[in-house]
Image (spheres, helix red, strand yellow):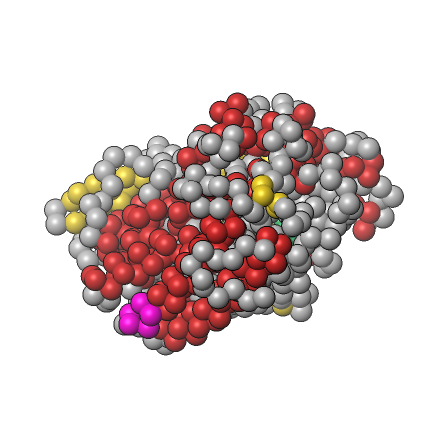
Amino acid sequence: MSETQRLSWLPFLKQPVPAGLREPVQVAAFELAQGASCPARAEIGPGMEDEAWELLPEGEGWIVRGGRRGVLYGAYALLEALHTGRKPWSGLQKPFYADRMLNCWDNMDGSVERGYAGRSLWFENGGFAYDPKRIRQMGRLFASCGLNVLCLNNVNVHWPAQRLIADMLPKLAEFAAILRPFGVRLMTSVDFSQPMRDGVPTADPLDSRVQDWWNVCADRVWAAIPDFFGFLVKADSEHRPGPFTYGRTHAEGANMLARAVAPHGGKLVWRAFVYNCQQDWRDTKTDRPCAAYETYAPLDGQFDGNVILQVKNGPFDFQVREPVSPTFFAMPRTDLALELQLAQEYTGQQIDIYAMPPMWDELLQDLPPQTVKAVAAVSNLGRDANFFGHPFAALNLFAFGEYAWYPCVRREQIVRDWVRLTYPDLPDGDRAALAALLLDSRHVYELYTAPLGLCWMVSPNNHYGPSPDGYEYQAWGTYHRADRSAIGIDRTGGGTGYAAQYPDALRARYESLDTCPDELLLFFHRLPYDYVMRDGRTLVQRVYDDHFEGLARTEAMAETLEALPLPSPDREEVLERIGRQRTDAREWCDIINSFFRRFSGAEDAHGRRIYP
Ligand code: GCU
């Protein structure tokens, strides 16, 4: 099977994109010629905003009219409508967020931090090494779901990634040129202490030698790549250098870099992922979820206009279930970006099926889309033939693009569209069965993993598989503190006080046992095993029931997939992975249930087998 046929949700575009196309409008015309089932042409609408587009009927077909990049998004939107059978959009369309970013954690040795789809698509052996055809296909994936910024190296900037914005700039410019026709702009992660590699004795953001170094650096980057997007920074986090070393705030650190890129129209994206990763587990006063708010909320209003502060969706770190991060509500005078993780680090590593749209719909209930100015996601891409490891993991990139363009609750539609586009030849009933399975997959995964918002019961080595005490005595600030009478952390006013970081309505909801959602009960409260839940079951019985149900549902998923006539090689890949997921679900079920029984002494009310 050729690579093009494995281009995930664009299987209807049969030919690889040729190399010579320079402008998005040319790509749009090419794609329409390949994929439209009726006459369709693309044209630039004079005076239209860069990313805006509209679809105008013309005879039996359509005109796609748009701004320079909008025309491309319009073309894919028309193709999507034609291939899903939906009515094409009418009226002028514009993205809700101007900056729709994918953060790739690719290292220059070719490995991908938390990558589950093979090695890097563009790095190997300390330099660039890629197949331009594949990069064009990736550009196509981006454009077809409306993503427009790619950060191509890991936020943990390991040597020699520092060279990307130094002597490797010509190579970086070549790479940027491949993606430009697809409307994608580049960004790189930078090392806050980078000037020191170049003989500057300090990285203090208030030192003029440091400022000069970054100013010259930015001048050179934008001279080589005039539409370069900006820099991404992870500072003072998990042993990365940062302004704290010099007694400076993160606003001072970010603004120094922002001023270097501002003359070029560049953005400075600063990650709000700071916490004490060397905590003593004996310390019960420090509560990791409090950290981002404590660091950043006092800085609201101090960041320059071209700084984007990128905040993870929850206060911990991409766990299966976390409440929304309170930092989002504390910084009305700062441009915030929501950071999601498509790479399934804690969510099944592209072995287990985990479709994210249900999770994002829930997030949208608590986080109105206008609270943030931009969106970013950690990439799930890699060099595997299908780009994503698990064929179904492609859905998460597609869905991220759709939410980034137009954030509103619509899990069913996105999942159904993806299934329809990806598997056009499946019979309707099978497509419906697959969509239902995907929509349920996050719930199933949650049922058999860490219960009731506890988080971190995963193996600390590779973040895959159960280990209820694995993080318990570690330095990462990740504790459930189970003893024989109770489990969980009290984060209410009577406990660590974390809940007080929320606006009143959310605080009240989480603090009260009457209104705290069951799924977050042990995130906010420390409770005895025989605590009686709203539905009359004890807490420990609920844990047992969920785990047996999660396992049973995984087994049912495996049967559904076995009966589904998916095309090859997706079928083989999916069946191989669901086999592993089934084994893992059993392991999770038995280990978590056994852990709870050992501490609580409670038998299962239904007499099911729990191992001693
Ligand atoms: C997690 C992840 C790391 C990553 C970090 C980050 O801790 O395990 O690999 O570097 O998040 O978001 O920076």
> Residue 526's quadrant in the figure?
top right
Does residue 528 appear to the left or right of 398 in the view shown?
A: right
Q: How many marks?
A: 0
Does residue 547 appear to the left or right of 482 in the view shown?
A: left
Q: Residue furthest right?
A: 201
Q: Position of residue 352 (x, y in %)?
A: 47, 63
Q: Which residues are magenta?
A: 559-564
Does residue 116 appear to the left or right of 413 in the view shown?
A: right
Nearer to me, 290 or 112 = 290
> Residue 107's quadrant in the figure?
bottom right
Nearer to me, 499 or 303 = 499
Tell me the quadrant of the picture where the C terminus can be found.
Answer: bottom right
Q: Is residue 123 visible?
A: no
Name which residue lies at 73% across and 53% down.
473
Name which residue lies at 74% across and 43% down.
276
Q: Position of residue 270 (x, y in %)?
A: 63, 39
Name which residue lies at 67% across and 58% down.
470
Nearer to me, 166 or 107 = 107
Q: Position of residue 152 (x, y in %)?
A: 58, 54
Q: Is residue 563 magenta?
A: yes
Nearer to me, 347 or 556 = 556
Q: Is residue 551 visible?
A: yes
> Residue 335's quadrant in the figure?
top right
Q: Is residue 511 magenta?
A: no
Q: Position of residue 402 (x, y in %)?
A: 38, 46
Tell me the quadrant of the picture where the N terminus can be found.
Answer: bottom left
Q: Main secondary structure of the magenta part?
A: helix
Name which residue lies at 57% across and 37% down.
524
